Every structure is written in structure tokens, then in C-alpha cells.
Image (spheres, helix red, strand yellow):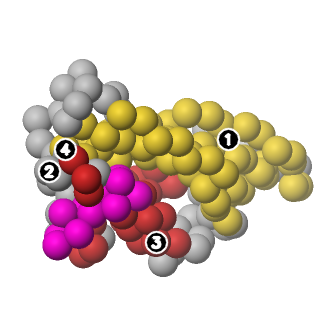
Amino acid sequence: MATKIEEIWNEVVNILRNSPVLSAYVKEVVEGEREDLPVFPAIIVNPINETEINHTVPEYKRITFQIQIEPWIEVISFEKQIIGENGDKGILDMVRDIKNELEKYPDLNGKCIKFDFPNTTYTSGTYPYRGAVITMSIEFITQKTNR
């Protein structure tokens, strides 16, 4: 299995965009930073780090690619911004849904060896917005010439 980093990126974005669970309430999944999101809930996806782990054989290398997934909600109910109810998602609900949907594809449809979520931090933007930063760490093998 020799994968290009672009294939990993596209697979993660496609899973997030095509998930029936997420598309039931997420209005937009965008690639790259945005100064302003026009709709909520939304997910921003950013590449953050690429590390060569080792060379498995002369023509292949093992890579860890980290992606930052940022879910953002507009708070509907002050009391339910963390854990929602009655169809309104809180930020913990949205983070759980994102992780659960990605974990349905443990090898990202044959594109990676494994992935995990080593860190999730929660943030509050200017009220009424609430967000999180999920770090997704993906391990895969690529050919040395496939940068």
C-alpha cells in the first residue's frame, strides 16, 4: 500500500462531507482557514504536520500526517452549548460524532495503516460561537518519489 498524502487528505474530507450523521446537521465542511464562517454548524479541516517515521524498504517511507479538524457551533441554548438536546448539538456531541464517523473507516478505505486522535481541545470564540480542535494523527506508507 503506497499512498500519496493528497489521497489521505481527500479521504478524510470526503468522509466528513458524506457522513449521513454529520450531514444531518453540519451545514458546511471547508478546507483551510476562514476568517468568517457563513453558516453553522461547520467543520474546518487543516493540515498541521507531516513527519517521516522511517524507511521501511529502500523505495518506501512511513509517514505520520496530522490533520486539525475544527467543529464550530452557534449556541442555540446557553445551557445546552456543551451537551445538547432535542436535536440541537452541543460541542461535545459534535466532537463525538466526528470521531465516531471517522472511526467507521479504521484504515480510511485502504489508504492508511492506522489513525488516532491524540488531542482534543475546546475553545469558545466570541459568544455565541463554540469550537474544538481535534488533532487526527494518520500513519501511512508512501513511495519516496510520491511527495
Residue assigned mark 4: 74
Tell whether 80 sits left or right of 136: left
Mark 2 touches mark 4? (CB < 8 Å): yes
Which residue is drawn at the image coordinates 66% and 51% (left, top)? 118
Q: Nearer the viewer, mark 1 or mark 4?
A: 4
Question: Given the image, on which type of amino acid does mark 4 rest?
Answer: Glu
Q: Which residues are magenta?
A: 82-92
Q: Amino acid at mark 3?
A: Asn
Residue 97 x, y percent position in the rendering:
38, 67
Q: At numbered mark 2, what does the secondary structure look like: helix, strand or loop?
A: loop
Q: From the image, tell me which residue sits under label 3.
A: 100
The answer to the question of whether label 4 and label 3 lie on touching residues, with beta carbons closer than 8 A, is: no
Q: Name the amino acid type tagged 1.
A: Thr
**Numbered disc in front, either 1 or 2:** 2
In the rendered image, the residue lying farthest to the front is: 79
Residue marked by disc 2: 76
Callout 3 secondary element: helix
Q: Quadrant of the N terminus?
A: bottom right
Q: Residue at x 17, y 72 (%)?
A: 86
> Residue reaching furthest left?
38
Q: Amino acid at mark 2?
A: Ile
First in sequence: mark 1 or mark 2?
2
In depth, the one of 147 and 11 nearer the eye is 11
Image spot of residue 70 (x, y percent): 39, 43
Compared to residue 38, the image places residue 81 above or below, namely below
Q: Are marks 2 and 3 in contact (CB under 8 Å)?
A: no
Q: Reading the chain from its start, which is encountered first: label 3 or label 1?
A: 3
